[in-house]
Amino acid sequence: MTAARLTILDPTSESRPARRELLTRPASVDGMTIGLLDIRKPRGDVFLDRIEQLLTERGARVLRFAKPTFTKPAPADLRHEIAAQCNLVIEALAD
Amino acid sequence: MTKPVLPDGFVAVVKRECATCVMTEPVLADISRTSTLTVFTQDDASFPESVPHLHDADLAVSWHNDIETVPTLLRVENGVEVARTVGWSRDAWREITGLAHLGEDLPVMRPGCGSLSVDPDLVDKLRARFTGSVLTARRVEMATAEDEFESMFNRGWTDGLPVIPPTPERVLRMLTGTTQRPDEVIAIAPPDLVPLTVEKVAINAVMAGCLPEYLPWVIAALEAVCNDKFNMHGVLATTMPVGPVIVCNGPGTKRIGMNSGINVFGQGNRANMTIGRAVQLTIRNVGGGRPGEVDRATHGNPGKLSFCFAEDEDGSPFGTLATDRGLPPGTDAVTVFAGEGPRCAVDQLARTPEELVTSFAACLRTVMHPKSVMAFDVILVVSPDHSRLFADAAWDRRRILDELHSRLQIDSNTILRGVDGMAEGLPDRFRDRTVPKFRPDGILLTHAGGGAGLFSSIIAGWANGDMGSQPVTVAVKS
């Protein structure tokens, strides 16, 4: 084995994702505005309709959102709209 | 390291190991008697004994002045080279020096020898020493006792197979394959949306095992997969078994030794294997697309290591894929397609093109599910043995595709949900219609494979169109 140390170049982006703490889980949803994001998988609406019903019964105000297609990330404007209007968001992954 | 300034007057670069250099020693002495001459010697610091000289020990003078042959004689004015001759040519040396009787005792000409600065054993180290500052990637020093191959596995940089350590020397050699600058951003790499530089591509191309001449193809394929229409993020994130399938076209495929024939999708050809691998390693390492993270494939497929091949253009009776997709004939190009593994479409008995397309249509019916329509595109790779039937009948691409599509119009009542005991199928609102298996441009026709075998091959795609992934064709920059 050679004693010379090998130097190699980092093949990665050399960036680390920003880490953000999750918000504290709320004790109650009463009075909260909750966004329901349908990612457009088939029957996601069935699931979210039921969630909306349950949340409304518990005093929450529900806003419905949908991605243009499940195959692509949510557009930045949609993410901003949800963040600006809602206290919480629930995303439906269904098939 | 900055380029050394050349002294004015005449400059000669020589080495003792070269017989032509040794032969010119008296001539150098003649020049130095009447003119300002600076001699740089590459190897033996004492050579040439009869003429004052400097030792180009680190070969900086030779490297920065592109000395490929010794002896080289330069005339320099105000630090700028204005004339050059290589080897010994009596006429050329006389012309440059203006000395009419120079070298009268010597032969008219003698070829020179290779400069040490282009010695294959030295050139990579010299390139790293003199141009290494163009590299900006973080340098990772391995410990003396560290096994670099194991270390690269442990760092998560590999696709599960060993990779070549991307040393600065190797990366700089890789960069000689392109005229693009190392810091040039060629794409935004999904899924992390990272600006992707030529340097990072070159690092991953070294790891994949590419030769420098493959680099423009890797860059083109990455430009294509990072195009929003291809939707690499979705191709990674889907649970379906697809990855980028790279179809290469143009005369360059032969120049770099790609395989379009026997075992075209299989192992054994360096260019096919490593170009596709470099693309995937780049998406993994720079883009951050790793299995179990953004890559959620249920099964994936072995082609996600590398799935790249050249089209057999010479033997194709229906033109080439890149030309069909709008590029001028003869253009080096890549087309990327989100595809699963290939499967065989056998027909050993068809003797007419009608029989053959009918067989193809029956096989194509089963893509994803026999009841699935319109949602998936496909590449049909026609083998030479099969394409001969089309050539003999003078069927061109349009005719073949029209005949295929006409056989792939389906009575919707046969593929409704629940029909034939299968829950899968179309909702009842599609009853009493004729529906096409594929979109009008949903069959990509290519020609490849070994010269024997009455089989063609089907590479099924993923969700198509704006909803999913669209094929993208990009010209390769020379």
Image (cartoon, coloured by chain):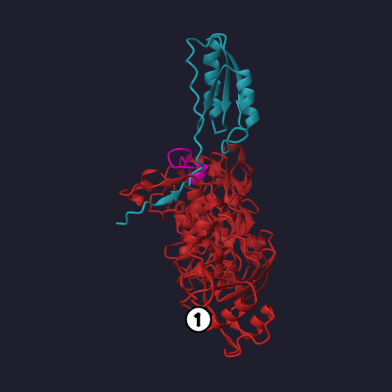
Chain colours: A cyan, B red
Q: Where residue B348 sits in the image (x, y, percent)?
A: 47, 70
Q: In the rendered view, would you say B290 is above or below B177?
A: above
Which kind of residue does numbered mark 1 sit on? Val
SS state under label 1: helix
**Is B477 part of what is drawn in magenta?**
no
Could one spot residue B257 in this view of the protein? no
In the displayed structure image, the side of residue B326 where residue B426 appears, left or right = left
Label 1, residues with CA under 10 Å away: few <14, some 14-19, many ≥20: some
B250, B266: nearer the viewer: B250
Residue at screen point 34% across, 47% down: B143
Snapshot quadrant of residue B100? bottom right
Which image quarter is the N terminus of chain B in? bottom right
A48, B99: nearer the viewer: B99
Residue at screen point 55% across, 56% down: B131
Q: Where residue B124 sits in the image (x, y, percent)?
A: 48, 62
The region drawn magenta spans B284-296
Residue ID for mark 1: B22
Q: Where residue B23 sits in the image (x, y, percent)?
A: 52, 84
Snapshot quadrant of residue B107? bottom right
B127, B435: nearer the viewer: B127
Q: Where residue A77 sits in the image (x, y, percent)?
A: 65, 29
**Is B291 part of what is drawn in magenta?**
yes
Could one spot residue B135 in this view of the protein? yes
Instruction: Provide the chain ID for the residue under circle 1.
Output: B
Residue at screen point 52% across, 15% down: A54
Residue sitting at the far front: B33
Snapshot quadrant of residue B254? bottom right
Name the dominant secondary structure of the magenta segment.
loop
Q: In the rendered view, would you say B380 is above or below B9?
A: above
Which image quarter is the C terminus of chain B in? bottom right
Q: In the rendered view, would you say B31 is above or below B353?
A: below
